[in-house]
Image: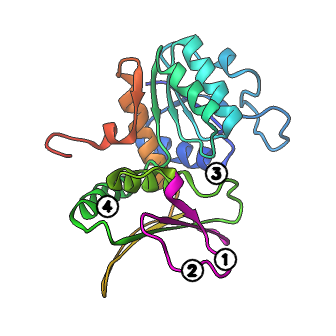
Amino acid sequence: MRLALMGSGGRMGVAVEAAAVALGVPIAVRIDRPGDPATPAGVWTGEPAEAIEPGMVVIEFTGAEGARQAAAACAARGAALVSGATGLAAADEAALRAAAERVAVLRASNFSLGLAALRVALRAAVARLPASWDIEVVERHHRQKRDSPSGTALTLADDLLAARGLTRAALRHGREGVIGARPAGEVGMHAVRGGTWVGDHEVLLAGEGECIELRHVVQDRAAFAHGAIAAARFVSTAAAGWYTIDDVFRGPGRP
């Protein structure tokens, strides 16, 4: 497996590099934005397609523009893609979907094993609880995070909405003022920004006289990075198509 790492100088790029070294996985090429004086020598800063070779696996934790560039380059060059960028618009997601028609594309908002387990637990819990129980999602991230709510929080919300037969129109982003009683069929969404939180996601399920709190906390980006390497191994032998992190973590006998 030959890796190409896009956004190599970013927080997740550095974490993926460290995970690759720890796991003995060589990185064939490092790609970053042109014009950044902090970019180390030897890092490619031109068009990604010029550095990506057929058969490579590209890992990208960048942004909307980087995700689109990675998708186009991988489709053109015959390289698989692991995409972890968040805050993407519908057009950006469509570009990734288009690339999946030609190469293997694995898209995830969170690559940690613990979060994958939390999603399974949440689906099981909601399936057994009355529809009258209220749901609130609270996420905490560092002060530098640009998108809100986080991609992981939206993934959790989508799981919960699907379990209740609701759409994103049911999401309530924060509350302020005299808003009256909480309506039925609402899923609260709250984003906290500050300090150096790597990733903290909590789902509150509240009934009459009791509640359940399910929480996943990432203490180090290594949790995401090791998952990204596992995802890269998966797509390196996968046929063209669209994959999620569940495909990586799902083993025999697992839901």
Q: Which mark is residue 122?
A: 4
User: In this picture, which residue range is highlighted in magenta?
Assistant: 169-198
Instruction: Categorize mark 2 by other alpha carbons within 10 Å: few (<14), some (14-19), many (20+).
Output: few
Work out whether mark 2 precedes mark 4 in sequence or the reverse, and give the earlier one. 4
Q: Does the image show residue 198?
A: no
Could you give the CA–CA distance between mark 3 and mark 1, rounded to whole angstroms?
Answer: 34 Å
Q: Which mark is residue 247?
A: none
Tell which residue pokes out farthest to the left in this image. 253
Q: Are marks 3 and 1 in contact (CB under 8 Å)?
A: no
Q: Does the image show residue 241?
A: yes
Q: Which residue in the protein does label 3 denote? A: 11
Residue 210 percent across, percent down from the top left = 30, 84
Q: Quadrant of the N terminus?
A: top left
Task: Decide: is 206 above or below 32.
Answer: below
* Along the viewing direction, whichever of 132 and 245 lies nearer the viewer: 132
Residue type, label 1: Glu
Q: Secondary structure at mark 3?
A: helix
Q: Which residue in the protein does label 1 denote? A: 176
Could you give the CA–CA distance between mark 2 and mark 4, rounded to whole angstroms?
Answer: 28 Å
Q: Nearer the viewer, mark 3 or mark 2?
A: 2
Q: Secondary structure at mark 4?
A: helix
Q: Secondary structure at mark 1?
A: loop
Q: Nearer the viewer, mark 3 or mark 4?
A: 4
Task: Decide: is 38 above or below 56.
Answer: below
Residue type, label 2: Gly
* Along the viewing direction, whichever of 246 and 235 lies nearer the viewer: 246
Q: Which residue does the image show at 34% across and 56% down from the upper left?
A: 164
Q: Which residue in the protein does label 2 denote? A: 180
Q: Which residue does the image show at 56% across and 64% down from the upper left?
A: 172
Residue type, label 4: Leu
